[in-house]
Image: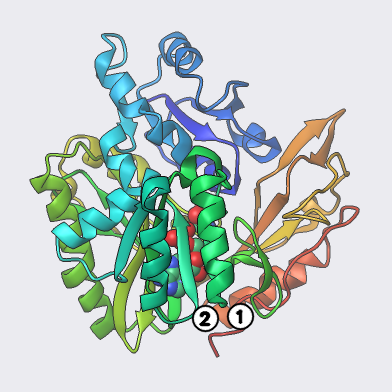
Amino acid sequence: MNILILGSGGREHTFAYKIAQSKRCNQLFVAPGNAGTSLIATNISISVTDFGAIKNCVIERKIDMVIVGPEDPLVNGIADYFLASEELKDVMLIGPSKEGALLEGSKERAKEFMIDHKIPTAAYQSFTKDTLAKGKQFLETLKSPYVLKADGLAAGKGVLIIKDIEEAKEELENMLSHNKFGEASSTVVIEEFLDGIELSVFVLTDGKNYKILPTAKDYKRIGEGDRGLNTGGMGAISPVPFVDDVLMQKIEERIVKPTVNGIQKENIAYKGFVFIGLINVDNEPLVIEYNVRMGDPETEVVLPRIQTDLVDLFEATYHQTLNKVSVKLDERAATTVMLVSGGYPEAYEKGKVISGISEIEDSIVFHAGTKLHEGKTVTNGGRVLAITSLDVDYKKALKKSYQNIEKLHFDTMNYRKDIGFDLS
Ligand code: AMP
Ligand code: GLY
């Protein structure tokens, strides 16, 4: 079949890398893609939120299956758009409906869903401009640090964790009354701070059945020792070494099953990924967020460990027959380390020539912010390349990634040298 992947990051290059290996895939397209995807698929220069252009592309290229990488098109209703169109309604689109995507698009909606389905999460209340005074009073009832979350999508920047109560009140006012995160912070969720170690669990669901995919842990801060500003993610490890069978069973029984059952009970059209962000507090898992897509860079360590043909898995997802397939895993550990542009996650320059990619041995180079320019691969974003390796344990895999990184170069290149530091 002909397959289209929407997106342009390391996540989408990883999807393309796996799908390009599938016997089921005839022609593969990525929109808009990057320099890495252009080597294994045809890049199409259209935006992931331009539904009209996507429709034309799907018709012209006779696309049978569409995999939606990022959240924006999902929250904007791409699945509903396909279903409402005579020409697109039978295309196998992998991604939830707009209603399903609200689990990521609205923190308040996600919290209500968790409460309704008795899924363990931090205690919370939500507030708007009209209830600002009540919000400040609620902060007084909590212990420091205070967690303030903009309700809507804020490109990963909408969560503030603040120690000082007066500063927390001020930021609440900035969010609600002064549009700190624009429309996204017109509602703010204030929640109890959970003290524990974070991990992510990935689930593929057809709305009725589910498959749990490998766990992963990402490293979001720019600086070593988890310090400094938040980024999209500086590296990841799969599986998460501290997740034993007992913890996994708690996660499945208390979180995964009620989540999928909740989706089904509420009649939410959902054929896609659920990325569950968890905090493990004294071996009790609690949900901090849902995302309605795969994570980036978690995809770069999760997908290389899946041996089952992804196209088969997606087809079963579309036909709601996930109960009839099994997911075979590579038992080895996978790690990825992100190479980023100097200055990222703040201002950075683009267009730097990348060298050394052809010298990499025994690691996979997934491109994120790259493009081809006059025959050369150049930087085109903050996160540039993800170097993924597999080995018997994460330490050996990391060693391979770091050894290969020595061969790579671009002006201002930066990366964290301590991925996995908190696990040993
Ligand atoms: P979110 O966008 O909801 O994932 O939040 C971003 C980050 O804030 C998470 O990855 C956590 O590190 C942190 N965080 C969110 N909620 C909480 C919480 N209730 N307690 C502690 N940390 C949190
Ligand atoms: N790595 C976190 C995310 O994809 O949201």
When asked about the image quadrant of residue 288, the answer is bottom left
Seen as rendered, the residue at the extreme right is 411
On-image quarter of the C terminus: bottom right
**Above or below, 131 relative to 61:** below
x, y percentage for residue 110?
29, 53
When asked about the image quadrant of residue 42, the answer is top right
Secondary element under disc 2, as helix, strand or loop, is: loop
Q: Residue at x 63, y 21 (%)?
A: 45
Tell me which amino acid carries mark 2: Asp
x, y percentage for residue 254?
18, 71
Question: Which mark, by number, is residue 17?
Answer: none
Q: Nearer the viewer, residue 396 or 183?
A: 183
Please state the total of marks drawn on the protein image: 2
Tell me, yes or no, whether the two marked residues, 1 and 2, touch with CB atoms within 8 Å. yes
x, y percentage for residue 265?
8, 47
Q: Which residue is drawn at 57% across and 24% down?
A: 47
Specify whether 315 is left or right of 216: left
Specify whether 135 is left or right of 420: left
x, y percentage for residue 204?
29, 51
**Above or below, 260 relative to 36:** below
Quickly name the residue at label 2: 393
Label 1: how many residues lie within 10 Å, few (<14), some (14-19) or many (20+)? some
Question: Which mark, by number, is residue 396?
Answer: 1
Res. 305 visible in picture: no
